[in-house]
Structures are given as C-alpha cells and as structure tokens.
Image (cartoon, rainbow, N blue to C red):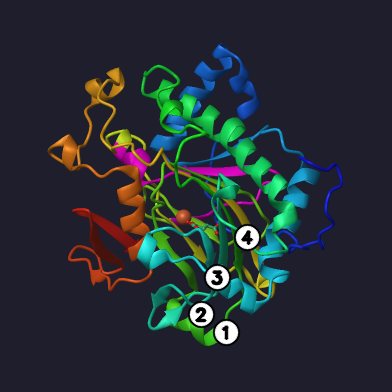
Amino acid sequence: MPSSVIPPVPHYESAPVTTEHLEYADLAVIDISQANSAEGRAQLALKVRDAMSTNGFFYVVGHGYSSDQMKRMFDIADVPFSRVNDEEKQKYVAQTKQTGSYQGYKLRQYWHIDGGVRDQIENYNINHDVTRRTHPEAVRPLLPEISQLAFHSHMNVLHPILRLLALGLELPEDTLVNLHKWESQSETYVRFMKYYPRHSEDEEKTNGVWLKGHTDFGTISILYSQPVAALQILTRDSEWKWVEHIENAIVVNAGDAMEFLSGGYYRATIHRVVQPPPDQRQYTRLGIFYFCMTDDDVRLVPLVASPLLQRVGFKRWFEKDEDAPLMSEWRKARTSAYGQTALLKSNTEARIEEEVINGVIVKHYN
Ligand SMILES: O=C(O)CCC(=O)C(=O)O
Ligand SMILES: [Fe+2]
C-alpha cells in the first residue's frame, strides 16, 4: 500500500441481531486455522465432505480477519451505494446482458422476481484483480483494502477449502487449487450487495421472496456473515431453513461448477433470500461476498482421477468432454440470462421454473 493513512469512511450501522425464533439450518463449523497442518487437514476434510453431502452449506471460522477488520470492511462495502450519486452509478453500470459479466453496478429493478415485481437490490461487483476496470471516485481510495480482502478470501479461505474438497475426493490436495490461481484470468470477484426494504404490496405479490431460490454458478461462494436474517437454504428434505448469523464467521457453499467438477458429488445447494423477521424489517441489509470461479479456460468435466468417484460413481452432464462448457462459457450464459429470460413452469413441480442453459436445465424456486 502506498500510504499508511487509512481513508476515513462513514460507519454503516447494521441491524441488531433478531430476537425472533427462526428454524435455523444445523450447519457444521469449520475452524480453518486447523488446516495449517496435514493432520488437521485430514480431519477437516472428512468434516467438510460430510457437510457437503448433507446441507451443502457450512461456516468457516478462524480465517484470520478480526471482527474489527470485518466491521471496517462493512463500512467500505456501503460506500458504492451511499457515497456515489445516481448519475455516477449510471456510468459504472455492468453491461451484464451483452458481456455476461456482473462487473460494475447492478442497480435496483434489474431482475424480475415474480408477478411483475422487480428486485430492490443493488450490487457493486469488483473483479479480484481490482485494476481490471475503473471505479467510482469514492471507491478509489478504498481499492487497496478491497484488493486485500479479495487476496485474503482467495488465499486464506478459498484455497484451504479447495484443498479439503480435493482431499475429500482422495485427489492430490492441490488439484482444485491449481484450477483457481490468484494470478489467472478469471471472473472470481468481490460483491457488495445492499437490499432495501420493500413495499407491502411487493411482499404480497412475491410471497416475501426477495431473491428466488437458485444455485450459484461458480465453484465456491464465500459470504461474510451479517446480522439480518433472510438467507434460507433448501434442505435435502425439501424444507426451507434459515441461515443463522455468527459474528465474524463466513458462510460457504458450492455452486454449479463444483457440482460439474465433482461429477455431482459436491452438490450446489439451492438457497434464496426472503423478507427478514419483523424486528429487522425496517433495516437495509448489506452483504459482502467473494464469488469464486475456476480460471476462465477450465472445462467443467468430472475429475475422473478421483478414486472416490470411481468407487461411488459420478454423473456426467455431457456425453463427450468436449461438449462440456468452459468456466467462462457457463458463467456468461448463466449471468446474461439471470432474472432476464422468461422462465417456464416445470412439468414436475409447481413452484419450480426452468430455463435451459448450454443444454443443462437450470431451476429457479419460488
Ligand atoms: O444475500 C444473501 O445472503 C445471498 C445472496 C445470494 O444468494 C447470491 O447473491 O447469489
Ligand atoms: Fe446465491
């Protein structure tokens, strides 16, 4: 960093933790600091494999950022929304439909949710290489810290998790790390996301759904836990369960690309965002994410060298490996279609809508 002076930013005060009794999902807690030794990794690998084959979501603690560092990051995360005016935001709007990339702003009302209601969510997305694009003036002094958060998420969270997932498949432990190099051209990015409270008519028309049930399209999604309860996962018993806030923890799940690479062994769990409980309804909800993808040129085919997959069997989505999409192709197709294309009602279940992307059925849940 060129200067040791930390630029001042206004404090973002998030909602107090809810006192409501919600049905929370029972998720494993992985202390990633234990992954520093080979013995620790062997133990954690079993725990992660178990978590991935049940809920598909788990918490990570011991990741090395303090609560105070994370508080500062949440203050920074609010800057693209509260310190940039509408006119400047327009200049940095992502050309999502044309480029299949979210880099820049996604402003409110871009996604269709249900019954003609559009979303009340603003995103600002920054590639892990923060120099790939220019940024609004208020964000520029904060880029060293945003870049550091990306690097931290990549090296101290993503890579250790990928080692555990590779060990779980009985593969050499750097197999997945080698597909997610920090220096490579990839879409892996930081997302700041702000949800604004909605009118009651919108809540009624959408049944309180803010972001429809979906799978993420990358390999691993890293979500820095925040207090406003709204995220729910669809359990293997087909029940929606809330994800509880744990101070300074990270919520982790796998996306489509991990499901493809693991031949269906590590499944992409469906999750959605709904209206928070009554005591948190008047607050905005600010999120920090690190969405991870393999390097652009990785073809999403099953890692057939895995002794485990050879024993238990695995799924192929594409008969011939050369027909499977590259990570960049899958990401572009999913991104440009999301919330924009007309969805068809599923033949099998009323609450599911479907679209076909690269020959694969992608489901959206209400
Ligand atoms: O806001 C959240 O908690 C989850 C958002 C999400 O699922 C996504 O952006 O893919
Ligand atoms: Fe998601």
Mark 4 and mark 2 in contact? Answer it, CB < 8 Å: no
Mark 3 and mark 1 in contact? Answer it, CB < 8 Å: no
The mark nearer the N terminus, 4 or 2, is 4
Q: Foreground: 163 or 298?
A: 298
Tag shown at residue 135:
4
The local crowd at label 4, few if under 14, some if 14 to 19, many if 20 or more residues have their Cα within 10 Å, is: many
The amino acid type, in three-letter code, at marker 3 is: Ile
Residues drawn in magenta: 240-260
The amino acid type, in three-letter code, at marker 1 is: His
Which residue bears the numbered disc 3? 121
- Confirm if mark 3 falls within 8 A of ligand 1: no
Instruction: Please give left or right for residue 77 compared with residue 182 in the image.
Output: right
Which x, y percent locates residue 55? 44, 43
Look at the image and say whether residue 245 sits in the magenta stretch. yes
Query: Which element carries disc 1, helix, strand or loop?
Result: loop
The local crowd at label 1, few if under 14, some if 14 to 19, many if 20 or more residues have their Cα within 10 Å, is: few
Residue drawn 23% across and 70% down? 344
The mark nearer the N terminus, 3 or 2, is 3
Q: Foreground: 20 or 132?
A: 132
Q: Foreground: 307 or 121?
A: 121
Q: Nearer the viewer, mark 3 or mark 2?
A: 3
Mark 2 and mark 1 in contact? Answer it, CB < 8 Å: yes
